[in-house]
Amino acid sequence: MSAAVSTVEAVAAALRDVRVGGFGVAETELRDACEAALKGAGFGALREVRLAPRCRADLVVDEMVVEVKCGRPHAGALAGQLHRYLGCPGIAGAVAVTEKRTPLPAEIDGKPVASVALHGAWGIALP
């Protein structure tokens, strides 16, 4: 297993237990909770990192982009956004954190991608 795959898996594992209160959570609140979980797991997270023009990552952890989305974003649009981020120098992988399950490929351009669906981790089923 490559170092990038191991790091993506570790970052995703740290984010699976994120909890926020109620429905209709603002993306900033969800991002704050993700940042706190990463720091609690011993990761140093940089916030709102500009990778290139039109490429501002919510969080960057050890060369991994963490993109936070409320609800269930369009999978194609999210994959396109991650593709742009993964094409930036110094980015080795990505973790997408969404409230609802959003199918993404395990790799984009040969770089590992993980998806964390928070509602699934909370044990509730939502449409």
Image (cartoon, helix red, strand yellow):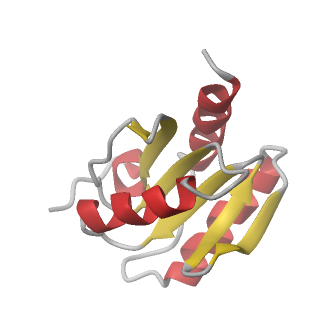
44 vs 96, left or right, is: right
Residue 126 x %, y %: 20, 60
126 vs 52, left or right, is: left
In this picture, is 22 found above or below 88? below
In this picture, is 5 found above or below 45? above
Picture residue at 53% right of the left edge, 50% below the top: 95
Picture residue at 67% right of the left edge, 65% below the top: 59
Residue 96 x %, y %: 47, 55
Give residue 25's quadrant in the image. bottom left
Asked if residue 95 shows in the view, the reply is: yes
Residue 89 x %, y %: 69, 54
Picture residue at 53% right of the left edge, 68% below the top: 20
Residue 33 x %, y %: 64, 67
Q: Residue furthest top?
A: 1
State which quarter of the image contains the N terminus.
Answer: top right
Give residue 99's quadrant in the image. bottom left
62 vs 32, left or right, is: right
Q: Residue furthest left?
A: 127
State which quarter of the image contains the C terminus.
Answer: bottom left
Asked if residue 99 shows in the view, the reply is: no
State the residue in front, 63 or 98. Answer: 63
